Amino acid sequence: MEALKFIVKKLAAFAVSIAALSFIIFSLLYLAPGDPARVLAGARRVDPAILESIRDQYHLNDSFFSQYFRWVDNALHLDFGNSIRTGAPVTDTVAPHLAVSLELVLVSLALSVLFGILFGVLAAKRRGKLSDKAINVVALVGTSAPSFAAGLLLLYVFALTFGWFPVYGIGDGSFGDTILHLTLPALALTIGVSALLMKVTRSAMLNEVDSDYTVFLRARAISPLKITAAQLKNAAGPILTSMGLVLASLIGATVLVETTFAIPGVGNLLASSVTMKDVPVVQFLTLVLAFFICLSSAVVDIAVYFINPAARAGRKRGAL
């Protein structure tokens, strides 16, 4: 029952966050300087008759809240209007770009979790030794390097100098060619994210390496692998929490990395849509990004509650 209450509470907070963000995102149209109809018309020249037809199409003569609730109602029915540039439904315009970005983010997330946790655990286990110092240096450089700068360096070394990877794009669509094209962008995103996870994992594991139960398990001749698994489980709280922040930073960094590698993903589409003032597409993409960030935060909090017994105990003590 306690777990169900916690899940409901987190999902309610997620719903409230999305509602507040949807209001802010919709308001961007009216916060932009000039006539909203002129903004919706995009970068082209239009005469007053076309502007008036745009006002009728988007109900701009209605009150602000009437327009907002109509937009929310349409959004709940997956109707986000039409792109100003293409004239096609926004969802049809965004779908292929979103698929590319999801592939890139998922590959980078998998690599970041693998390298970040693996080397973070290794650094904690070998605290003060050469390998620990080397990992700390790598983590410091990784967290300091912007993703687009890392991307440019990877492009110069592995694409231009050695010619091992393509310079831009996503290839012909086949699995092997797509992986080849996404390798460098994924590595550019992974460098900073995995470095952050290394530092968090190392810090969380250091508390467990010197704990009393670790000494007890070693005294009972438990295998080092099982001891590490127990330590990692107890250190899962801060690691999982940081993974929520990692996913948010990945989504933000994707915009710059996709531009650097000319990948036709959400980031590239968002940048071009802002330039061309394609407001319906910008609103939809911003809402989608906010949805994924808030959802990842809620999922991470729920996962921490079930995986880490200390988190549940702390919440019970707080309730008392």
Image: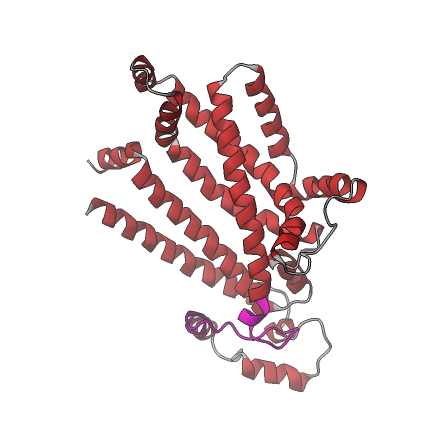
Q: Number of numbered discs present?
A: 0
Image position of 225 with respect to 5: above or below: above
Residue 160 seen in the current view: yes
Q: Residue at x 29, y 50 (%)?
A: 7
Quadrant in which the C terminus is drawn? top left
Q: Nearer the viewer, residue 38 or 155?
A: 155
Residue, far bottom = 49
Judged left or right of residue 130, residue 245 is: left
Residue, far top = 219
Q: Which residues, given as a range, are shown in magenta? A: 72-94
Q: Nearer the viewer, residue 299 or 119?
A: 119
Residue 149 drawn at (x, y percent)? 70, 41
Q: Residue at x 50, y 38 (%)?
A: 113
Residue 251 seen in the current view: no
Q: How is the image coloured?
A: secondary structure
Image position of 78 with respect to 208: above or below: below
Q: Nearer the viewer, residue 71 or 304?
A: 304
Residue 21 drawn at (x, y percent)? 46, 58
Judged left or right of residue 71, residue 94 is: right
Residue 5 drawn at (x, y percent)? 24, 49
Residue, far right = 161
Q: Residue at x 46, y 38 (%)?
A: 242
Residue 206, quarter of the rendered image: top left
Judged left or right of residue 266, residue 73 is: left
Residue 179 drawn at (x, y percent)? 62, 50
Q: Nearer the viewer, residue 166 or 145?
A: 166
In reply to whether residue 229 is colored magenta, the answer given is no
Residue 225, quarter of the rendered image: top left
Residue 239, quarter of the rendered image: top left
Image position of 278 with respect to 221: above or below: below
In reply to whether residue 85 is colored magenta, the answer given is yes
Q: Residue at x 55, y 47 (%)?
A: 107
